[in-house]
Amino acid sequence: MEYIVEGQDVSPEELSDESWQSPGLRAQEQRRAALRLATAAAKPTTTPASLPSSKRVNTSPPQHRRRAPLPRLPADTIHIVGRPKSPVELTKLQPWHLYTALLQAAFLQDLPPASRDTVRIHPVNNTFTLSVADSARAQAYLRITSLTVSGNTFTVHLYAPPPDDALRGILYHAFDDFTDQAILEDLQASNPTLSVVGGRRMGKAPHILVTLMEPKLPRWIFYHGVQLRLLPFRNKVEACYNCRSTGHRTDVCPKPRQERCHRCGAAHPTPPEGSPPTCNPRCIVCNGNHSTYSSNCKHRYVQRPQRQKAPVPDTHPPPQQPVPPAAVVRSSQQAASGPSPAPPPKSVTASPPPVPAVPKPTSQPMNSTWPRGAPGLPSEPQVVALQQENASLRQQVTAQSAQIAAQKTQIDSLQAKLQALEEKLESAITVKSSLPSTICSSSDMDVQTPEGCTGKRRRPNTPLESLHFSEEVQVSIKTALVDLEERLDSRFKLRPPASHCTARSSKFPAHRLRRLPPRHVLPISTVNS
């Protein structure tokens, strides 16, 4: 059987010349070549001073050994830290042998098992910690200068560090040939409101390390009569110049002492301070082209691992999707026909994760088909309440929209009628109609004569009769007429004072009033009177 594949034709000579390699073998060869180059670069063939200073090396943070956190010592005990000054690896000593050597060196008796002093060896920085409940026994431990463990004698330095919750700050360039005791006494005397528990020089640097028992580190502090800025102290990665590794310092290095350059790590003495360097620097922490603990090192400070927040569990259940009728019919047919044979094996290809199946309710039997479609699944009470509220709001919005449309139509009709009235009044003015001086009644052309009021029903003969169909329309018309009256009075200056209207109303009592004709048909003699 012949197969047709895509590609280029290769002659038998090209196929048999042993020049073709598989992609996997080619990748392995490239990997081996890269490893050989890296190994050759790690072994310097020349002195570090002959390397070009412009060559850049990719820096990387120090690799920390993954380990479980150490158990906390009791907080109500005295903690004493021991640092060996001789090359000895404490992790290879038996802890009970170290405890026995401490008791012998301090000339102390062993206590009952329930109240013994606790010894803990740090697995990385080559130190040990004592937890002592008695102050007298703690003073005896602090006087130890050497230990003999399994026949091996080495010098050791023990001290009591500040509490774990103490804060530390740095006074930069504040050291001036004072002892640590003098520095601590001056800090305590100059700052009586602060609980200063420690003050010493930072190694050989001209800086002072201050330790305080305060809830917050102060920004300023007094020292020898001067107010200095106190900056927070940050722990640096411990680096050893002896073995050129991180995790411990040079004074506690378990390996034998070697004469190495602190700048480049080569086997030659460190150049004197102040003399020009003769070698290229190499950082122990990040393997960069700078000195260890230089300000150019981005990884010189200890990076605390950031704890990832646990995902908040979703309290709402996932929405359930309705099962289509075709799937239900298919499932019922499969159930009736029995188990189906196993499908053929598929090719190994990347496929999306399977979607979880929707659980089927067992309380009600599933029908094969629905005449009106699949019924919806029951919703939550909150969803049902929101749907009902939305429906009521939609009805309110529809009713308000209809009411607004009706009011707009009514307003348009009123405006048209008012405009027609204005045109009639303007036309009456243009023909020089005689108008009365004032209107004493509440509306225009509503005053009746005395003859019209005697036993007869009032007959509305005003042209505004068609507008008196609602109270709101009457108010609008009266307001418009009053406005027109004021404009006409101001134009012809015929508006009399209020006293004239009062006198006229008293002259004609209500039972003698008669309906007056419209103003534009009154005789001139009546208007002049």
Image: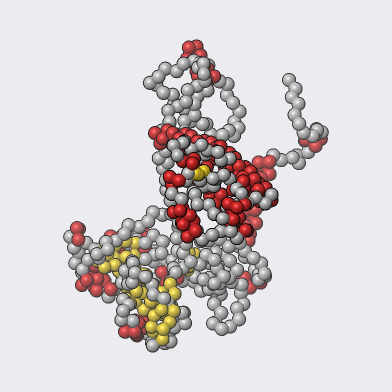
Camera sees residue 185: no
Identify the image quadrant of the C terminus: bottom right
Residue 310 in picture, x, y percent from top left? 42, 48
Question: Foreground: 156 or 291?
Answer: 291
Residue at the left extreme? 112
Residue 91 in picture, x, y percent from top left? 37, 60
The total number of labels drawn is 0
Camera sees residue 122: yes
Up-down: is 112 above or below 82?
above
Residue 319 in picture, x, y percent from top left? 47, 33
Up-down: is 436 above or below 22?
below
Q: In which quarter of the image is residue 201?
A: bottom left
Q: Which residue is drawn at 44% across and 74% down?
A: 231
Residue at the top extreme? 337
Up-down: is 223 above or below 371?
below
Asked if residue 283 lies left or right of residue 126, the reply is right
Identify the image quadrant of the N terminus: top right
Asked if residue 307 lies left or right of residue 430, the reply is left
Asked if residue 39 lies left or right of residue 505, the reply is right
Q: Residue at x 39, y 33 (%)?
A: 381
Residue 477 in picture, x, y percent from top left? 54, 46
Question: Foreground: 224 or 3?
Answer: 224
Q: Residue at x 44, y 24 (%)?
A: 360
